Image (tube, helix red, strand yellow):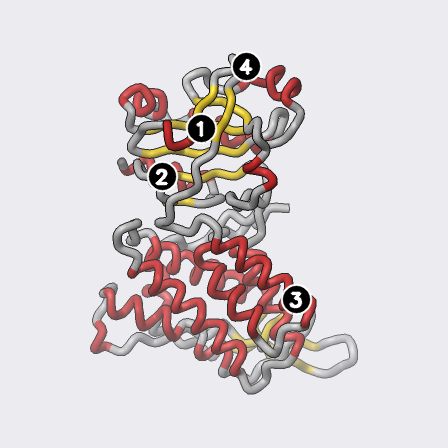
Amino acid sequence: MKITKVLALSSALLLAACGNNSNNRNTNQVTDGSVTEDRAFPTVSTPLVYGNNTAEAREYNLEHYWDNFFNGSGTTDATSILGVKDGDVEQALANYIGALAAVKSMATPDSLQPLRLAQKSVRTMFSRLENHQKADSLTYIRFTEMVTKYLYDPNSPVRDEDLYLPFAEAAGRSALTSPDMRAAYDFEARQCRTNQFGEKVPDFRYSTASGSKGTLYGVRADYTMLFFSNPGCSACKEIIDQVMSRPYVERYIKEGRLAIVNIYIDEEIAKWRDYLHNYPSYWINGYDYTFQLRDSGKFDIRAIPSLYLLDSSKRVLFKDAPTENVLAFLDKI
């Protein structure tokens, strides 16, 4: 099931939400006759000294986004976390991830500082959770599950392994994490460290249907879209249709500005050959005849389809990214 809340992919929305520290509450009667209080998600107030929509204001808001939430006195149950209804927490989390993504989008392989700032904010969020005076197991479990669903689930439209990495690292070290989950977080962190933003991906060999051999590093283009797909995969077809909806794609490929390398990593080569006519002929369509991509662990391919975008030096700009994010980047070039 895909997450349907794709909200606030802009730091401006985060800033607009700040300075309105609402204390509105609603009371709800539960089945045993007792009354519980719900609170609105508490926003952060930006000190006037930072001004509006400045780099300092954005940094302050990311640093303190979760303070009032984790300092609250609400209870956690099946539908609320610390007194805030699940839907409101998810809305706040989606807004927060959008703000992180907006900051990260300013990073380049030669200038990682914006990414580091976003990752620092994620570590601060985890610290607020861990240090909360009521860091009971239910609050910890429910909040960490929500963060994982949004930032790491392969079906999440806001997934981002670079932003999930500091969270997984912290959860793997935390005394609040159960031993079995600690091992799971450690594994996820290792996966996230593979092919991080700005790093060069490993080279690999592929074969085309005609039998000619090629390498990833032999592909020359300003940008390379690396697409791992399977024949007959409906989600893969959706990505192909989305990419082909951009009228500039074929022209960019002819001009050498873009290359699309579409690779099959499994063993049913006959099935792949039969499906080949469904792929655009001016893409590089091949299969990994060495099976290194599937077995070596040099690429983090958690699910098919998986989409990367690389620069001319084969450095990662997007890794296992939502198609909309990759296309939004290409739209601007």
Quadrant of the snapshot with the C terminus: top left
Relative to 105, residue 186 above or below: below
Q: Which residue has dot 4 on it?
A: 277
Question: The residue tagged with tag 2: helix, strand or loop?
Answer: loop
Q: Position of residue 312 (x, y in %)?
A: 30, 36
Q: Which residue has dot 2 on it?
A: 314
Q: Which residue has dot 1 on it?
A: 261
How far apart in space, not on screen, are marks 4 and 2 (Cα)?
Answer: 28 Å
Q: Look at label 3 and name its amino acid.
A: Met
- In the shown orientation, is residue 82 left or right of residue 69? right
Relative to 314, residue 99 above or below: below
Q: Which residue has dot 3 on it?
A: 181
How far apart in space, not on screen, are marks 2 and 1 (Cα)?
Answer: 12 Å
Relative to 267, residue 211 above or below: above
Which callout, 3 or 1, points at the residue further toward the start of the chain?
3
User: Would you identify the image quadrant in which residue 75 lies?
Assistant: bottom right
Task: Determine the residue positioned at 35% across, 25% down.
Answer: 249
Which callout, 4 or 3, points at the residue further toward the start of the chain?
3
Which callout, 2 or 3, points at the residue further toward the start of the chain?
3
Q: Look at label 4 and name its amino acid.
A: His
How far apart in space, not on screen, are marks 4 and 3 (Cα)?
Answer: 44 Å
**Mark 2 or mark 1, whichever is nearer to me:** 2
Q: Look at label 1 and name its amino acid.
A: Val
Q: Residues within 10 Å of mark 1 (few under 14, many from 20)?
A: some
